[in-house]
Amino acid sequence: MVALVPQPLHVDAGDGQLLLDGVRVRSEGLGGDAPALERLVAELVASGAGDLAGETPDGRSDDGARGVPVVLRIDPAAGPQGSTSAERYSLVADADGVVLAAPGRSGLLHAARTLRQLVEHAGEGPARLPHVVVHDAPRYPWRGLSVDVARHFFGPSALRAVVDVMASYKLNVLHLHLTDDQGWRIESPSRPELVRRSSGSDVSGGPGGHLSLDDFRALQEYAAERGVRVVPEIDLPGHVNAATHAYGELVPDGVPTDEYQGVEVGFSRLAYGLPATEPFVRDVLGDLARATVGEHVHVGGDEVHTMDADEYARFVVLAEQVVRDAGKTPVVWQEGAKAPLRPGTVVQYWDTNATDLEYLVEAARAGARVVLSPGNRVYLDMKYVEGFPLGLQWAGFVELRDSYDWEPEDVVDGLPAGAIEGVEAAVWTETLTSTDELFTMLLPRLSAVAEVAWSAPERKDWDDYRRRVAHEARSWRRDGVAFHPSAQVDW
Ligand code: TNX
């Protein structure tokens, strides 16, 4: 049976199946990348198959040789006809074995993820793979998840687990919300007091923590190997109590603010007119941009409730300039579009309670790219249902179907469809204190968001997704990741 999440563009299932008594992975045209990718693909298939070698009745695949051949092939002609996505791929499984083909590495990784689900969903008993042809490509190039590591700190091992789950659903952007009122979670070499004074607690009065630049580098590498890039965020000019606690020079009266362990938002701010402010912004964003491998650096800009529009706009323009000077492309939360943005800057829509969004539509018409994170659909820190023990509810309850059943082009009235760069889920951690709690909020909803971001609208179907996602619980259980068994699915 073929049950893939996210649903590919074209799937043609045949009648036969391959018995997997092992895999022999080899590649064509991959160059220096070959050994690492071959190993990764072999591991993925093996993990999807459970105990693979020798588990078939006669220990042989039905082509007669031990170990099913899996070929990884660089092929510009791969993928759905007419697709120009750099991430496109094709997968063919027949009596001769498996061929994964793509124009580049990212497509081959996607193909391998599809292969893993095909093996895993084939059911109990000896590992099998249905004969099938898949031609696939994503709808949007930006398919993300934002994780708040400021309210509660989540360190490298939790974040690697997040990357693993993201990659399994072909998500490719991990956005890290690294700073907020409650903590500064990234080493900023030119401002050492930030982590020294402001990373040692969290909203539960726990020990907090931060990522060293080495941690950050290693995480980006781990993610990149799996086709995920990291977009780090320093949130300015609000959500900055961790900064004003560490550096009194950022406060008009020069007195550092108190540590903050509450969950209110909107009260803290930088002050544009202070002499220390601009050098601070240049230092911390410069440090972060230098440490970032990917193209984008997020500068925040949300919920600055105590600043007039002029001063706010000056901050956005400054932050945008500093990031561009460092050779990166800036990302801002939706409010940032009230400032005069440069073309190409990415704006992240989130607040589904906001009414007049004409400024966002204008910014998109003027060349901003838009990433959609509608709170009432993809804020995975919202409770699933009333009374759910974890999460918030300012955007409403978000059951699995809410995360699944929505159309990106219909979210913001008047937004040109061509301005939509992609879709990003978000998980804020005011109420989430452990990796299990984090994953309980992410799964299964993250897989629904992945299908919104990846699959063509005509390929989406709630009843069909309900059936397909039920198979995913097996791998979550096996990998020991927590999930919420939503009442909307027969698990
Ligand atoms: C809004 S989304 C926020 C965060 C909160 C979140 C809780 C956004 C840009 N700001 O500060 O953590 O709601 O859901």
Image (cartoon, rainbow, N blue to C red):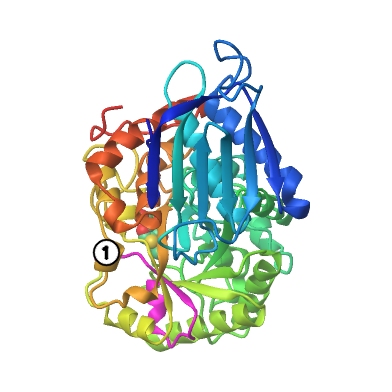
Could you say where residue 95 lies in the image, as x and y percent from the top left? 53, 31
Query: Compared to 233, does 109 lie above or below?
Result: above
Q: Which residue is drawn at 58% across and 34% down?
A: 97
Residue wearing tag 1: 352
Query: Compared to 336, does 62 lie above or below?
Result: above
Whether residue 288 appears in this view of the structure is yes
Query: Compared to 215, does 25 lie above or below?
Result: above
Q: What residue type is labelled 1?
A: Thr
State the image quarter where residue 324 is shown: bottom right
Q: Give the range drawn in magenta.
A: 333-353
Left or right for 486, reference 228: left
Q: Which residue is drawn at 60% across and 28% down?
A: 46
Secondary structure of the residue carrying numbered label 1: loop
| Number of numbered discs | 1
Q: Residue at x 34, y 57 (%)?
A: 456
Could you say where residue 437 lies in the image, as x and y percent from the top left? 43, 36
Whether residue 205 appears in this view of the structure is no
